[in-house]
Image: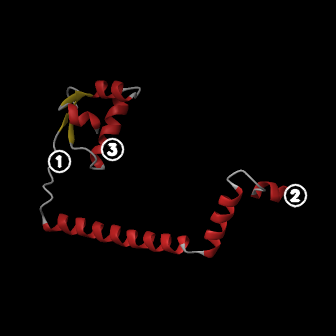
Amino acid sequence: QRLTQTYLTLSLQDIATAIGLPSSKDAERRILRMINAREIHATISQKDGMVSFMEDPEQYNTTSTLGLIDDQIHKMMTLHNKVALFDEQVSTSRTYISKVMMKERHGRFGGVDDFEMSIEH
């Protein structure tokens, strides 16, 4: 994707060389996968082996696009709330607090660690 920010048209061979692929065919396959995944917007000329990169044609102003964005925002907010709840549960857990205090008291490598205890028993 960084190449699309600098160049408008590149040869498949130049792309292969720039990203360390063995051949222009490998570059073509990679570019086609990226086009199909909508990661980039480009066309490949079979005649001369050139790739023309284009700006994203999506204007992000249709109701369906706005609906998708809204859905993603709601999913992220739900995920945020779950993580915040989990964080609160962990940080107020007596077991967690005890373990943290024990580690602080003995230092990270001071005292008997779990590995040594498991060997003795």
Does the CB distance between marks 2 and 1 fall below 8 Å? no
Q: Disc 1 on helix, strand or loop?
A: loop
Q: Position of residue 14 (x, y in %)?
A: 29, 24
Q: Which mark is residue 33?
A: 3
Residue drawn 12% across the image and 61% down it = 61
| Position of residue 76 in the picture relative to residue 101 (left or right) | left
Tell me the quarter of the image containing the N terminus.
top left
Label 2 or label 3, whichever lies nearer to me, is: 2
Q: Amino acid at mark 2?
A: Glu
Residue drawn 62% across the image and 75% down it = 94
Reading the image, the residue beneath label 1 is 56
How many angstroms separate mark 2 from mark 1 (CA)? 63 Å
Q: Out of 67 and 83, give the one closest to the viewer.
A: 83
| Residue 32 against residue 103 in the figure, above or below | above
- Mark 3 or 1, nearer chain start: 3
Q: Out of 41 and 119, give the one closest to the viewer.
A: 119
Residue drawn 16% across the image and 43% down it = 55
| Position of residue 53 in the picture relative to residue 21 (left or right) | left
Tell me the quarter of the image containing the C terminus.
bottom right
Q: Amino acid at mark 1?
A: Asp
Residue furthest right as drawn: 120
Q: Position of residue 63 (x, y in %)?
A: 14, 68
Q: Disc 3 on helix, strand or loop?
A: helix
